[in-house]
Amino acid sequence: MAAEYKNFVAIGDSFTEGLGDPDPHGDRFRGWADLFAGCAAERWPGFSYANLAIRGRLFDRIVDEQVVPAIKQSPDLVSFAAGSNDALRPGFNPVPLATRAHEVVRLLKASGAQVILFTAADVSPHIPGMAMIRKRFVTMNDAYKRVAKRHDAILVDLWEDRAFDDPRLWSVDRLHMSTLGHQRVAQNVCRALEVDPDPSWLQPLPDLPSPRREMNGVQWAGKHLAPWVKRRLTGKSSGDAITPKRPHLTRVER
């Protein structure tokens, strides 16, 4: 019999905040966690959901700012996705990340929560030069696989999901997922927890040539990569003025 959950807290960065998937009913982003919570509420009436994720956060800051507030809300389900922003930076060291990830998941499990972990999807086919740092993501993903196995956490393996080879699942900045991409993640999470996904997510994309990019590599670098590099050099983050969109467990309206 599948487990039943009543309270879900999502922890992480832009992936979990939902960047790339504008909320059709508000001025923030929606994303896979919101989508999954909606399906979970259909399966488990009274289901509550909080989302503490903030874009641009590095692994250590996610842990320091979000783990304890999550535990204090006594959820029985927590998602933890962190480290991709670290892997994009020079000098990335997966060893301390893996060590601390073990500790984080141990704490979350000890609090009584089941934990959802992720491998990062492969963005390298869509971004010039990403092949050079692809190995960092492979190493980070391997670490999360070991953490999930050691602590009996649920692993959602996005790296092996070849649907993400389709550029239509990525937003124009090529770093964040599009609405279709977030729907795909939500579908994978639903299946991992034996929750029925929205039927519309299961419809295959038209078998057409991949759409042309809105800009070439040089244009993309000027509009999206250069601002990202500038923030890194100045010590700023895209999430500096952002607060969690759903900081407290709130019942999901069906």
Image: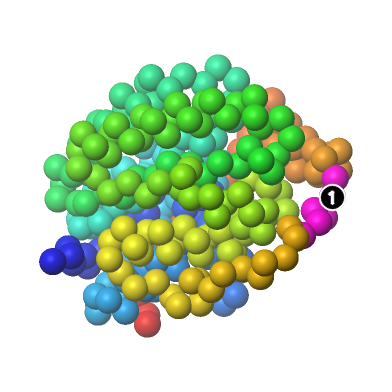
Report the residue that reaches farthest toward the bottom: 254
Dot 1 amino acid type = Met
Q: Which image quarter holds the C terminus?
A: bottom left
Q: Would you say 128 lies left or right of 146 here? A: right
Q: Nearer the viewer, residue 100 or 60?
A: 100
Q: Would you say 99 lies left or right of 204 here? A: left
SS type, badge 1: loop
Q: Which image quarter holds the N terminus?
A: bottom left
Q: Is residue 65 visible?
A: yes
Residue 203, horizontal then vertical, whole percent: 53, 73
Q: Which of the 4 quarters of the picture holds residue 134? A: top right
Magenta residue check for 46 = no
Q: Is residue 242 visible?
A: no
156 over 147 or under it: above or below:
below
Residue 47, horizontal then vertical, whole percent: 27, 72
Q: Determine the residue positioned at 59% across, 75% down.
A: 24
Q: Determine the residue positioned at 80% across, 43% down.
A: 220
Q: Nearer the viewer, residue 246 or 76?
A: 76
Residue 222, horizontal then vertical, whole percent: 83, 39
Q: Determine the residue positioned at 46% across, 58% down.
A: 185
Q: Magenta region: which residues?
A: 211-216
Is the magenta region chiefly helix, strand or loop? loop
Q: Which of the 4 quarters of the picture holds residue 223? A: top right
Q: Which residue is mark 1?
A: 215
Q: Would you say 196 lies left or right of 13 here? A: left
66 over 190 or under it: above or below:
above
Q: Residues within 10 Å of mark 1 (few under 14, many from 20)?
A: few
Q: Nearer the viewer, residue 67 or 15?
A: 15
- Numbered-mark total: 1
